[in-house]
Image: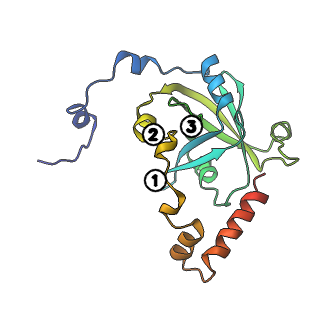
Amino acid sequence: MTDTLNDETDLRAIYAAPSDGAVRKEIATLDPHSKRFIALSPFLCIGTARPDGLADVSPRGGAPGFVHVLSDAELAMPDRPGNNRLDTLTNLTVAPSVGLLFFIPGFEDLLRVNGVARMTTAPALMERFIEHGKPPRSVMIVEVREVYLHCTKAIRRAGLWDPARFTARDAMPSAGQIYRDQIKLDAPAEAIDQMLEHNAKTELY
């Protein structure tokens, strides 16, 4: 006897079958509703798979509509300056499948888009995403395979948009203090925080 759930048979022993609506809501292309959701979204999380099999999730953000709909079957997203680890991008060179989860502040609904991605520096696409006079480092093209509206329960349980449930920042040390402790840095936490803030202000684009 084991408590580990090893396969779908084990899972279905305790989980009911999905409703007909939960299955049928998945569509293969971007419809007007999903396009509108993407146009209003300033933030998403992107999931990829590492060569060693571990998964990775990374945030992406910009002005609402920073992800462009190229067609019913393609999205384009700029890659802006970051930490240069390139976790997501190097993952895509090995396993191009991606999962995108779009958020709109104040909305409890989420939009899930799964597909296959590739990176490009094609001049026309780079010019399309110039912001503050600066082009992106590259552009991700996502060939859409699955689209569906995600139910509200996770956001509602979390109270994510409820100001009464926001956590005060001083509930945890600053990022500078965390980096100082984790990496064993000699610099004062305040100096690290100042450097991080300066970078956030000057290297957004």
Q: Residues within 10 Å of mark 1 (few under 14, many from 20)?
A: few
Q: Residues within 10 Å of mark 2 (few under 14, many from 20)?
A: some
Q: Which residue is mark 1?
A: 54
Type of amino acid under label 1: Leu
Of tags 1 and 2, the one toward the viewer is 2
Of tags 3 and 1, the one toward the viewer is 3
Between marks 1 and 2, how big is the CA–CA gap? 29 Å
Q: Which mark is residue 100?
A: 3
Res 11 quadrant in image:
top left
Q: Nearer the viewer, residue 191 or 112?
A: 191
Of tags 2 and 3, the one toward the viewer is 2
- Furthest-bottom residue in this view: 186
162 horizontally vs 83: left or right: left
User: Which numbered disc, 1 or 2, marks the residue that appears first in the sequence?
Assistant: 1
Q: Nearer the viewer, residue 123 or 163?
A: 163
> Could you tell me residue 137's position as x and y percent?
77, 50
Q: Which mark is residue 159?
A: 2
Task: For mark 1, give the secondary structure.
Answer: loop
Between marks 2 and 3, how big is the CA–CA gap? 21 Å
